[in-house]
Image (tube, grey):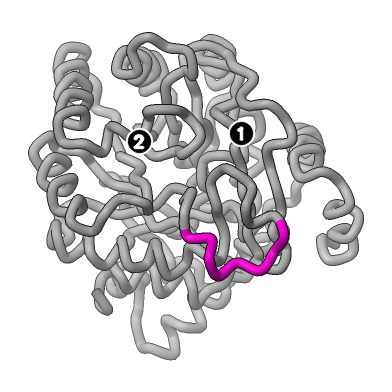
């Protein structure tokens, strides 16, 4: 059905097409059985001490305000991450702010954390309990005077609805956000988060989402800080505002974060380096350029416990999850691996 509809969808502005998808998903009419596959038990993993039916997640950015997560679970995802959620509702950057790069199977966005804010999202999550494993991605408002306080407020109010919370320090579309990759600022942020967890007796795992635009030498420093403050996981990586030289599409020079196939090798390199650096002590969620079983398998064998996609679904439709699962199972059988968990890091 998606292949039939795709020409019509791609005639729409990318953000209009996204809004249409969110509206459609609110009807929650998706037949769950359609997206199931045989032998899916081979894909079961443990993430943050919980068993998931498969390692394939939906990255933050699609369901920004936690409106349709239960419909999205029906596509066959092992987990879904909503957000980025900020304390106050905000519109984000001026439109147009999302661009397709069809020749490169990529997107560029400069959305700027448009979302409904903590209060609305909290009420939504309270009224509509997540059916499966849910991550919540948090960040600061654009006009905030104290980004750390924004992170703390979001974490304090949203952790009770989540199976994990992602601290997003890596979007290229919020001024000053990536400064948190610096040792001093990251130490301050994580120490205050840890203090809050202890004070409020919060057990919800915390993941840190990292930029692909940092230097390789910074990976070791960030890894040491992450281990010191007992961060539960890392997400590698967010979008890049660099790496445009080899792109073909006319939209390649738009300002914003690049996602999709051009990130496959870049994020793969980060996963390998980070996995070697921390020796598998904390789980990695790999993101960037995943749209088939082979690209998913490469991320996992490089060291990722789980993976996420978003742009791949834009180009291939919701059936991409089912196809990735089928292809992963075929690869496991061919490689004589009984379970995907056994493949983590074997090629790092």
* Residue 229 appearing in the image: yes
Q: Where is residue 251 in the image (x, y as percent from the top left)?
A: 69, 55
Element under label 1? loop
Q: Where is residue 95 in the image (x, y as percent from the top left)?
A: 73, 31
Helix, strand or loop: magenta stretch: loop
Q: Which residue is drawn at 34% across and 82% down?
A: 337
Q: Nearer the viewer, residue 106 or 245?
A: 245
Q: How crowded is mark 1: few (under 14 residues within 10 Å), some or many (20 or more)?
A: many
Residue placed under numbered mark 1 in the picture: 111
The correct choice, above or below, for 293 with respect to 256 in the image is: below
The correct choice, above or below, for 98 with respect to 176 in the image is: below
* Residue 205 appearing in the image: no
Q: Using the numbered discs, state the Cα–Cα distance from disc 1 to disc 2 in whole angstroms.
A: 16 Å
Q: Nearer the viewer, residue 163 or 257?
A: 257
Residue 245 covered by magenta stretch: yes
* Quarter of the C terminus within the rendering: bottom left
Residue 131 in which image quadrant? top right
* Quarter of the N terminus within the rendering: bottom right
Q: Where is residue 332 in the image (x, y as percent from the top left)?
A: 42, 81
Residue 334 covered by magenta stretch: no
Magenta segment boundaries in residue numbering: 243-250
Residue placed under numbered mark 2 in the picture: 178
Q: How many labels does the image show?
A: 2
Q: Nearer the viewer, residue 320 or 192?
A: 192
The correct choice, above or below, for 29 with respect to 311 in the image is: above
Residue 168 relative to residue 128: left or right:
left
Residue 313 in which image quadrant? bottom right
Q: Position of residue 236 (x, y in %)?
A: 36, 53
The correct choice, above or below, for 317 with respect to 227 in the image is: below
1 and 2 marks in contact (CB < 8 Å)? no
First of labels 1, 2 by sequence position: 1
């Amino acid at each position: 059905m998606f292949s039939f509809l795709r020409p019509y969808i791609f005639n729409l502005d990318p953000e209009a097409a996204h809004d249409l998808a969110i509206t459609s998903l609110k009807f929650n009419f998706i037949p769950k059985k359609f997206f199931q596959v045989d032998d899916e038990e081979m894909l079961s993993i443990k993430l943050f001490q919980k068993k998931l039916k498969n390692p394939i997640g939906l990255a933050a950015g699609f369901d920004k305000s936690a409106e349709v997560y239960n419909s999205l679970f029906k596509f066959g995802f092992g987990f879904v991450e909503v957000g980025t959620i900020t304390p106050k509702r905000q519109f984000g950057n001026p439109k147009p702010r999302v661009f397709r790069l069809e020749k490169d199977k990529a997107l560029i966005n400069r959305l700027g954390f448009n979302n409904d804010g903590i209060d609305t999202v909290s009420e939504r999550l309270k009224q509509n309990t997540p059916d499966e494993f849910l991550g919540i991605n948090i960040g600061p408002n654009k006009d905030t005077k104290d980004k750390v306080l924004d992170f703390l407020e979001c974490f304090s109010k949203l952790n009770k609805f989540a199976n994990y919370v992602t601290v997003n320090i890596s979007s290229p579309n919020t001024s000053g956000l990536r400064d948190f990759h610096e040792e001093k600022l990251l130490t301050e942020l994580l120490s205050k988060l840890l203090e809050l967890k202890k004070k409020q007796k919060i057990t919800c795992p915390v993941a840190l989402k990292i930029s692909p635009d940092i230097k390789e030498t910074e990976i070791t420093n960030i890894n040491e800080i992450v281990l010191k403050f007992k961060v539960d996981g890392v997400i590698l990586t967010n979008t890049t505002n660099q790496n445009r030289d080899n792109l073909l599409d006319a939209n390649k020079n738009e300002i914003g974060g690049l996602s999709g196939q051009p990130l496959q090798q870049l994020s793969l390199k980060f996963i390998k380096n980070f996995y070697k650096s921390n020796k598998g002590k904390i789980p990695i969620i790999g993101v960037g350029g995943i749209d088939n079983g082979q690209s998913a398998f490469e991320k996992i064998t490089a060291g990722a416990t789980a993976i996420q996609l978003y742009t791949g679904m834009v180009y291939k439709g919701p059936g991409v999850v089912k196809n990735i699962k089928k292809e992963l199972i075929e690869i496991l059988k061919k490689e004589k691996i009984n379970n995907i968990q056994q493949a983590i890091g074997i090629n790092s």
